């Protein structure tokens, strides 16, 4: 007992223990899902975010210039591909317009409410990346719009290629995006994304975790009799958690039976590359009227 | 002369900003997932060895918490805790105003391993990472170590000179009083 008092009498150790407890408590408290930040956090995030914005923009222009010079050769090929895509688009647009009109008439005939009609009319905001955190334990990036543009935690963020992550915290003028790479089914705050395959909308699965070793996403809980195949395009289905529909996620790399043989598990190669950040798009769901 | 400390502090802040904005653009894309250099921490290690460990502790907690709040993904606190404590511990063991280059380099190597390990286990404690330690060691801690090592070599001469000037002035004022 005397030994213990002697140990605690050591000021250094005492301060260390107090610090340890304080920090563990702080981590535990901030780990729980918080919807709003306190004002000191907002102030810090906004002021540092502004400085980061000033630094990131010129730096990304310079880096972009060198990358453009390096990519000069591939421009012709890319142009070719874009022309083909443009051709597809003009053809599909006619079909789409016609179908949309029919759809609207049918919705009217069936007395859809305003909310049901607008459920999938997502808005979008373009955002500039201002900084990236490369900490492998929790990778995040900051973007330059926040509460001022109506951003809320939980909104989906995509790049031109595909889904990148989910907004985790918002301050007045900046917000933080939690990348898909830090997603895991065993996390205390995990949010799985309900997903389906293009053209096979009966397929249902949950994108649950990202494997940092292989760089692949894992889609689980696919029913055994579904016809999911390699190279299927996986998009979000918007069934759970108000997560928006029609977000491109990735391509099926392989399908296996799960551990207990009751369901299938698919490995998915994400479209987004999780590097070279410039502009991102935040998807804003339509306002739900009370 | 009064402002040397403040200027150094501002430079440290600029380094923190550059770490989040310019550094990710400089790293080649193949290494993007593997390098997460913490340059501010290396400067703090220098301060721990050549100046005083308490200054290093305060600076470590300050910049760690700043990092945590600005890049608030999962929780606040791990960086503040690990940067402060590991800089303090390195200062406690190695603090010597006349430490030569080899000592400083070994401090950088040990300190950066200590910091990364501490962060790894803090995230492990809250079940936020699910990789094994030896994989993490090979995947990012050792590449990080090399980046930190090179950075320490670059800043060694100018930073040590500045810190020694601050130290001299401090001892002079102590004699005068």
Image (tube, rainbow, N blue to C red):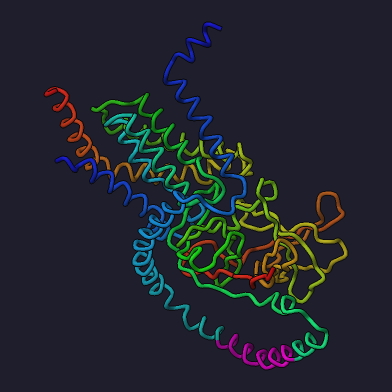
- Residue B43: name its quadrant: top left
The image position of residue B146, as x and y in percent, is 41, 44
> Magenta stretch containing residue A79, yes or no?
no
Q: For residue A112, say whether it is visible.
A: yes
Q: Residue at x 11, y 24 (%)?
A: B176
Q: Quadrant of the N terminus of chain B?
A: top left
Q: Residue at x 60, y 64 (%)?
A: A155
The image position of residue B99, as x and y in percent, is 27, 28
The image position of residue B90, as x and y in percent, is 38, 29
Q: Between residue A280 and residue A87, name the one nearer to us.
A: A280
Q: Between residue A271 and residue A2, name the one nearer to us.
A: A2
Q: Is residue A285 left or right of residue A127?
A: right
Q: Residue at x 82, y 88 (%)?
A: A109
Relative to A199, is A34 above or below?
Answer: above
Q: Between residue B101 and residue A157, name the one nearer to us.
A: A157
Q: What span is in magenta?
A: A83-101
Q: For residue B26, say whether it is visible.
A: no
Name the outermost residue toward the top.
Answer: A2
The image position of residue A160, as x and y in percent, is 55, 73
Q: Between residue A107 and residue A87, name the one nearer to us.
A: A107
How many labels, in total? 0
Relative to B108, is B151 above or below?
Answer: below
Relative to A84, is A20 above or below?
Answer: above
């Amino acid at each position: 007992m005397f030994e213990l008092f002697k140990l605690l009498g050591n000021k250094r150790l005492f301060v260390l223990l107090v610090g340890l407890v304080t920090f563990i408590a702080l981590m535990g408290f901030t780990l729980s899902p918080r919807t709003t930040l306190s004002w000191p956090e907002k102030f810090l995030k906004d002021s540092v975010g502004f400085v980061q914005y000033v630094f990131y923009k010129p730096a990304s222009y310079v880096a972009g210039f060198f990358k453009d010079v390096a990519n000069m050769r591939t421009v012709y090929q890319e142009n070719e591909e874009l022309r083909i895509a443009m051709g597809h688009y003009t053809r599909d647009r006619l079909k789409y317009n016609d179908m949309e009109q029919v759809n609207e008439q049918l919705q009217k005939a069936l007395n859809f409410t305003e909310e049901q009609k607008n459920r999938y009319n997502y808005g979008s905001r373009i955002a500039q990346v201002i900084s990236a955190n490369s900490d492998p334990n929790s990778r995040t990036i900051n973007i330059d719009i926040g509460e001022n543009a109506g951003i809320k935690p939980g909104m989906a963020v995509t790049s031109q290629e595909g889904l990148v992550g989910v907004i985790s915290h918002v301050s007045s003028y900046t917000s933080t995006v939690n990348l898909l790479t830090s997603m895991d089914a065993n996390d205390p705050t995990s949010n799985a994304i309900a997903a389906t395959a293009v053209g096979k909308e009966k397929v249902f699965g949950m994108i649950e975790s990202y494997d940092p070793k292989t760089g692949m996403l894992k889609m689980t809980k696919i029913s055994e009799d579904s016809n999911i195949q390699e190279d299927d395009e996986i998009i979000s289905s918007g069934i759970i958690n108000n997560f928006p529909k029609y977000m491109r996620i990735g391509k099926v790399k392989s399908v296996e039976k799960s551990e207990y043989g009751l369901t299938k598990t698919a490995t998915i190669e994400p479209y987004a590359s999780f590097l070279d950040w410039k502009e991102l798009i935040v998807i804003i769901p339509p306002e739900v009227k009370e | 002369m009064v402002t040397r400390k403040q200027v150094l502090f501002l430079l440290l802040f600029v380094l923190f900003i550059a770490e989040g904005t310019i550094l990710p653009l400089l790293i080649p894309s193949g290494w993007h997932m593997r390098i997460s250099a913490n340059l501010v921490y290396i400067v703090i290690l220098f301060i721990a060895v050549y100046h005083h460990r308490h200054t290093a502790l305060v600076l470590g907690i300050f910049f760690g918490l700043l990092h945590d709040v600005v890049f608030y993904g999962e929780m606040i606190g791990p960086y503040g805790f690990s940067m402060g404590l590991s800089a303090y511990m390195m200062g406690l063991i190695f603090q010597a105003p006349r430490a030569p280059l080899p000592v400083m380099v070994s401090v950088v190597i040990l300190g950066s391993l200590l910091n990364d390990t501490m962060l790894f286990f803090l995230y492990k404690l809250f079940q936020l990472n699910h990789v094994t330690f030896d994989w993490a060691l090979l995947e990012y801690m050792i590449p990080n170590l090399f980046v930190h090592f090179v950075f320490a070599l670059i800043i060694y001469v100018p930073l040590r000179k500045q810190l020694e000037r601050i130290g001299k002035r401090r001892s002079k004022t102590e004699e005068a009083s």
